[in-house]
Amino acid sequence: MPNIYQNISSNKRDTVVIMVLFIAVVSFIGWFVGNYFYDGSGVTFLSLALIFSGISGLASYYTSDKIVLAISSAREVSHDEAPDLYNLVENMSIASGIPMPKVYIIDDSSMNAFATGRDPNHGVICFTSGIIQRLEKRELEGVVAHEMSHIGDYDTRLMCIVSVLVGSVSLLSNWMTRGFFFRGRRRSSSDGGELGGILFVIGLVLLILSPIIATLIKLAISRNREYLADSSAALITRYPNGLANALRKISQDTEILEAANSATAHLYITDPVRDRVGSSISNLFNTHPTIEERIKRLEAM
Amino acid sequence: MVYVVLAIAIVLAVFVIGVYNGLVSLNVKIKEAWSQIDVQLKRRADLIPNLVETVKGYAAHEKEVFENVTAARAALMSAKTPKEAGEADKALGGALGRLFAVAEAYPELKAQEGFINLQKELSDTEDKVAYSRQFYNSVVRQFNEKVVVFPSNLIAGMFGFKQQEFFQAEETEKEPVKVKF
């Protein structure tokens, strides 16, 4: 079974692989839209899509912590207001070398936690009062280490880049639709007959499905980063069973976190909207891996 | 042809500079991690006077114990090398153990809020010392890996980088603390 270091390496490799594929797919789509639906070059369209998407991405990246905290009605706590929690976060900060983030609490009896912030110097970490009360010290330590690993691995930055790419794909797909309906297909006579026609249809189908494909890739990255945060946390605490036990306790908790919704779901340690959406969703659409799989990997380290 | 050679030379230079900088910055991180251990040890030492005063309030006659603790603390504060600091830390740990053993006999002392808080803070500080040592070891590990792994070991050899020592618990630290009454 892979040890902690191997887990971390393979998770980081997975991120690189997924990102390279993603960028290749986005570039192809940009080229395709530009060449087939407009006379302009694919590069122009790709750049435009990236710029538009990028501006909104940057804006959300810099304000991510404030917005999320406001939506979740969290309050900041100092060392004196929550000494045990503060000491735990401080200890994890010393053990990992990640600068001490600001600590927030959400007054809710359900069990969950999240971390955000654009880089380790502006880190923010938040816990529900439920998780603080109901977990034992070594379990809470594992949760703290997991959240700090998200900050230390620059996950906010990565997810922002990914969102920019997903947004670009949606824009390109959108423009394609307008191009198709209002301008018609150009260059039809210069295509290589039947082969050109087939390629065009394939490309068209891919283009229609592209927003869904892009979203699936984004969710795959999100799950991959969760595994990475789990293995990094195991390295910081040298006690993977702490986090495994915490996850077990959290999975048995049926309470719903009122303040969470699908926009902020991916930040939490376990999916807070899991049970609210009704019928079971296939694993591909989950922002987090299944808790059973996470516990299995942790206990094998 | 000249351009190919130039391109190769540039790529090599970038590689060497990259690896060298990586080694140098890890070296700086190691030094910082070491002084962070010191910070936590000093923080622990700062809690001692308060603790001694609190216990003295109830058990003033146990002079020997107080003297041992104060002497060990002074030794820690004036330690110059890491080795001296390690030994002084060990002595302080032993003296503190005896101090708490003494406190066991005084129920009013044990129930006093000030004493309880000090105990908690001391325990937390000892956790912090352990974590800062763990972090020091993990940075040393990263540095040592770079020194032995190919191809960065070539650069390390060229510039004279050697593996650094991990922080080990001293042999006697691993023995259980003997408490004498």
Image: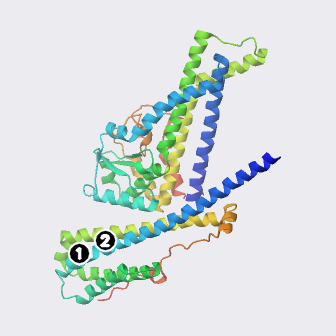
In the image, residue B143 sits, relative to residue A134, either above or below, namely below
- Residues A16 and B144: in front is B144
Q: Is residue A283 visible?
A: no
Figure quadrant of residue A271: top left
Which residue, given by chain and number where applicable, does mark 1 sit on?
B50
Q: Looking at the picture, which amino acid does disc 1 mark?
A: Asn
Which residue, given by chain and number where applicable, does mark 2 sit on?
B122
Q: Looking at the picture, which amino acid does disc 2 mark?
A: Leu
Image check: A213 left or right of A149?
A: right
Q: What residue appears at the point 58 percent right and 30 percent down from the top-left corner? A: A213
- Residues B121 and A7: in front is B121
Q: For mark 1, give the secondary structure.
A: helix
Q: For mark 2, give the secondary structure.
A: helix
In the image, residue A28 sits, relative to residue B80, either above or below, namely above
Q: Quadrant of the C terminus of chain B?
A: bottom left
Identify the chain of the residue marked 1, using the numbered disc in the image.
B
